[in-house]
Image: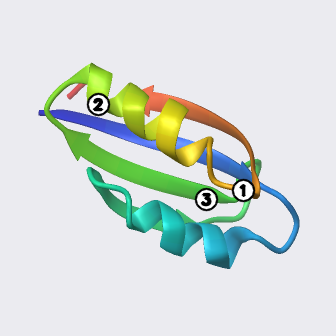
Amino acid sequence: MVTAFVMIKANTGEADRLKDSIESIDGVQSAHIVAGDVDLIAKAIVETPAEVKEIAATHVQSIEGVEDTQTYIAMD
């Protein structure tokens, strides 16, 4: 299993709507609106690193209102 965290910057006022959209993506376990440099953090648990790429690069980045993402894969 691969656990990854996707940091998401959102357009102003879009965080609530994006949270629901992100949580509906297969493999995403949870999404949280946070304070700080990013607006949301999504946790994904999938079988392969390729699935992490699919979630972050294809699904999350294609949602209208997403400005930028950074993805971190857990090492433990």
Decide if residue 53 is in sight here: yes
Coordinates of residue 65 in the picture (x, y in percent): 76, 58
Coordinates of residue 69 in the picture (x, y in percent): 64, 37
Which sits in the foreground, 10 or 26?
A: 26
**Label 1 CA crowd tier, 10 Å (few <14, some 14–19, many 20+):** few
Task: Please state if 67 lies on the left or on the right of 43 as rendered.
Answer: right
Task: Please state if 43 lies on the left or on the right of 37 as rendered.
Answer: left
According to the picture, the residue beneath numbered tag 1 turns out to be 64
Residue at 49 percent of width and 44 percent of height = 59
Task: Please state if 12 lies on the left or on the right of 16 as rendered.
Answer: right
Could you tell me how far apart the alpha carbons at marks 1 and 3 are, in whole angstroms? 14 Å
Q: Amino acid at mark 1?
A: Glu
Residue at 65 percent of width and 78 percent of height = 16
Q: Of discs 1 and 3, which sits in the foreground?
A: 1
Q: Of discs 3 and 2, which sits in the foreground?
A: 2
- Furthest-right residue in this view: 12
According to the picture, the residue beneath numbered tag 3 turns out to be 40
